[in-house]
């Protein structure tokens, strides 16, 4: 049996939750967003001294140097065939118990805990949006790319903040300085505001840095998911912090992207 989930409507209640002060966000059931991460610092503080700072910065150095337009095309071609292995959602989740995300300055827990906590927090706050609960559970499953069954890609090709390739790298990207060693940074075809794209072309037509987000979105689409477009948008762009945190690259968005971005703000 296939359950068809209609595109959700972004109602006033959801908008009020987005507009509120994140520091005051309290989810149903008493879950309160903490003020600091596992290391006692504010979230996503890449300059704070911690035991993970050097690991995170080295991750982004290698990531920013190697995530080129050509590399992304090659990865999408190789992994878009979906010929690595076949397993259930829960089997994928269990695989992630082996990995900790080197790009994350806030978490040092296995990924399985992150997925379950995300889904449960969303379920408590949005009990009627079952598609959003599922999206929360599976949004990071693409990190199975780290596993030998899926090619055992290096972390810089799987995790971390994502960004468009094929156009200029925006300075709001974390550790922007390392992009200067990326070949595309000096390529006139790729280093302008629009690069190979056009205004309002839509993010579906934009190549994003390769990683778990894009891979999981490809998997969902090729398996004919019944998730609404907002769910797929969340999966592909939840690590696109330059967009949903800083408002960069909005010149590439179309109207559907702008509508789905509201749900991504709910998710984040």
Image: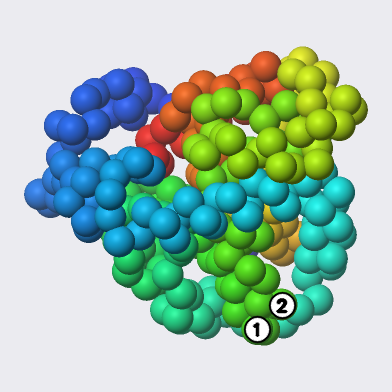
Q: Residue 58 at what x, y percent from top left?
A: 52, 56
Q: Which is nearer the eye, 130 or 98?
A: 98
Do callouts 1 and 2 mark residues in contact (Cβ within 8 Å)?
yes
Please tell me in which quadrant of the rendered image residue 35 appears.
top left
Q: Quadrant of the C terminus?
A: top left
What residue is rendered at 58% in x and 50% in y? 61
Q: Residue furthest right?
A: 189
User: Residue 142 vs residue 265: left or right?
Assistant: right
What residue is rendered at 57% in x and 26% in y? 171
Please tell me in which quadrant of the rendered image residue 162 appears.
top right
For label 2, the crowd category at 10 Å Cα-Cα, with few meaning under 14, some 14 to 19 and many 20 or more, is few
Q: Which is nearer the eye, 226 or 111?
A: 111
Res 199 label: none
Visible residue check, residue 247: yes
User: Residue 62 vs residue 24: left or right?
Assistant: right
Q: Residue 168 at what x, y percent from top left?
A: 73, 27
Q: What is the basis of the colouring in this image? A: rainbow
Q: Identify residue for label 1.
A: 148
For label 1, the crowd category at 10 Å Cα-Cα, with few meaning under 14, some 14 to 19 and many 20 or more, is few
The CA distance from mark 1 to mark 2 is 5 Å
Q: Identify residue for label 2.
A: 151
Visible residue check, residue 13: no
Please tell me in which quadrant of the rendered image residue 195 appears.
top right
73 to 223, vertically: above or below: above
What residue is rendered at 62% in x and 20% in y? 250
What residue is rendered at 37% in x and 72% in y? 110
Badge 2 marks a residue whose secondary structure is loop
Q: How many marks?
A: 2
């Amino acid at each position: 049996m296939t359950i068809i989930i209609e595109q959700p409507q972004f109602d006033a209640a959801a908008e009020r939750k987005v507009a509120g002060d994140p520091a005051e966000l309290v989810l149903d059931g008493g879950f309160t967003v903490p003020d600091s991460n596992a290391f006692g610092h504010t979230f996503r503080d890449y300059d704070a001294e911690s035991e993970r700072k050097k690991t995170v910065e080295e991750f982004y150095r290698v990531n920013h140097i190697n995530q080129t337009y050509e590399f992304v095309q090659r990865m999408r071609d190789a992994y878009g065939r979906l010929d690595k292995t076949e397993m259930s959602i829960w089997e994928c989740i269990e695989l992630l118990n082996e990995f900790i995300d080197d790009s994350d300055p806030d978490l040092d827990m296995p990924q399985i805990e992150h997925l379950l906590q995300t889904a449960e927090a969303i379920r408590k706050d949005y009990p009627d949006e079952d598609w959003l609960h599922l999206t929360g559970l599976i949004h990071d499953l693409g990190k199975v790319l780290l596993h030998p069954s899926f090619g055992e890609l290096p972390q810089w090709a799987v995790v971390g903040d994502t960004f468009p390739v094929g156009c200029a790298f925006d300075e709001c990207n974390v550790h922007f300085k390392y992009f200067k060693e990326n070949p595309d940074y000096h390529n006139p075809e790729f280093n302008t505001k629009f690069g190979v794209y056009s205004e309002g072309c839509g993010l579906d037509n934009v190549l994003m840095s390769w990683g778990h987000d894009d891979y999981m979105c490809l998997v969902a689409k090729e398996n004919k998911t019944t998730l609404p477009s907002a769910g797929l948008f969340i999966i592909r762009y939840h690590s696109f912090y330059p967009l949903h945190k800083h408002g960069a690259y909005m010149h590439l968005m179309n109207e559907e992207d702008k509508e789905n971005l509201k749900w991504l703000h709910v998710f984040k």
